[in-house]
Image: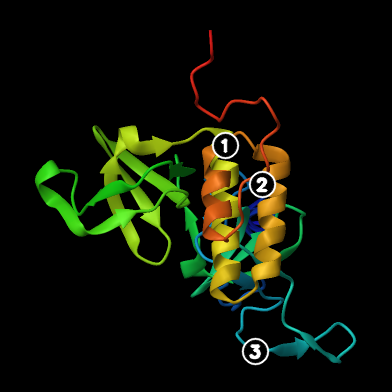
Amino acid sequence: MIRRALLLAALLAAACRPSPGGTAAPPGTPPSTAAAVPASAAPAFVTAASPVRREASDAAKVKGPDGKDVQNLVAFLHRGEQVTVVETREDWVRIRTSDDREGWLKSGAVMQGDGLAPATVLVPADVFDRPDLLAANAKRKLDPGTLLLVVKAKPPFTEVNVSGTGNAWVLSERLATGDREVQVAKLVEKARWLERYKKHDEALQVLALAREHFADVPLVDLLATELGEAAPAQAAGTPPAGAAPQR
């Protein structure tokens, strides 16, 4: 009887012992409403310019560590920024930004998935409702410099996420996925957003940044034209870009 009692006590102790890497929850504790996301989660991108909140709430202010009201704002992210999803909670996701700050975004402002990657188009591109040439949508086109998020390929088409209009299909050959073109597309996206909110001077600063680092990418001149800025004066004796060399 004594041996059986000792064996029963050992089994009960093993059942209550926390699993490796975690702590056993007290009896009666309800499951958490937040779901942790593994560190090896798929890439995640911001799909629209959005504020990162201290708390999962639209409230303008929340209680800070000292009990005083503070702005419910950690950062402001733009479409195309890559983030790390830490956990999800109903309509919100907790993310880590590129500078390691953490906060909450509306779940609709983040897209996550294996193979997800940014892209753009250098010339106007046709949009298709389905991956079929007969499904061309005559009312829609992608403007050069549009920042896209590649979702999946179904040759000769690729499904892409388009800001403000959901997903669409384009011919894969139209996509530009080079790093420099994509970086300029991100700047074009931000400059266009600033223009919509009447922040022309800030949009010009974005253009100056693009010219400084990516002057050889054609989309930079496109952005300059949109912002009403003439191309930089051409050096004397320098042939126009794309001109055939003189013999």
From the top left corner, tell me how far across and down residue 246 is, in percent.
54, 13
Q: Earlier in the sequence, mark 1 or mark 3?
A: 3
Secondary structure state at the residue bearing disc 3: loop
Q: Residue at x 68, y 60 (%)?
A: 204
How many residues crowd around disc 3 within 10 Å: few (fewer than 14), some, or many (20 or more)?
A: few
For residue 109, above or below residue 145:
below
Q: Are marks 2 and 3 in contact (CB under 8 Å)?
A: no
Label pair 2/1, CB-CB below 8 angstroms: yes
Q: Is the residue 54 above or below the residue 245 in the image? A: below
Give the residue number, with chain letter if any, for mark 2: 210
The residue located at (46%, 42%) in the rendering is 119
Q: Where in the figure is residue 183, as x and y percent of width and height?
A: 60, 43
Amino acid at dot 2: Ala
Residue 217: give its label: 1
Q: Quadrant of the N terminus?
A: bottom right
Instruction: Give the class, few, some or many, for how many residues have Cα within 10 Å of label 1's Cα (few <14, many ≥20).
Output: some
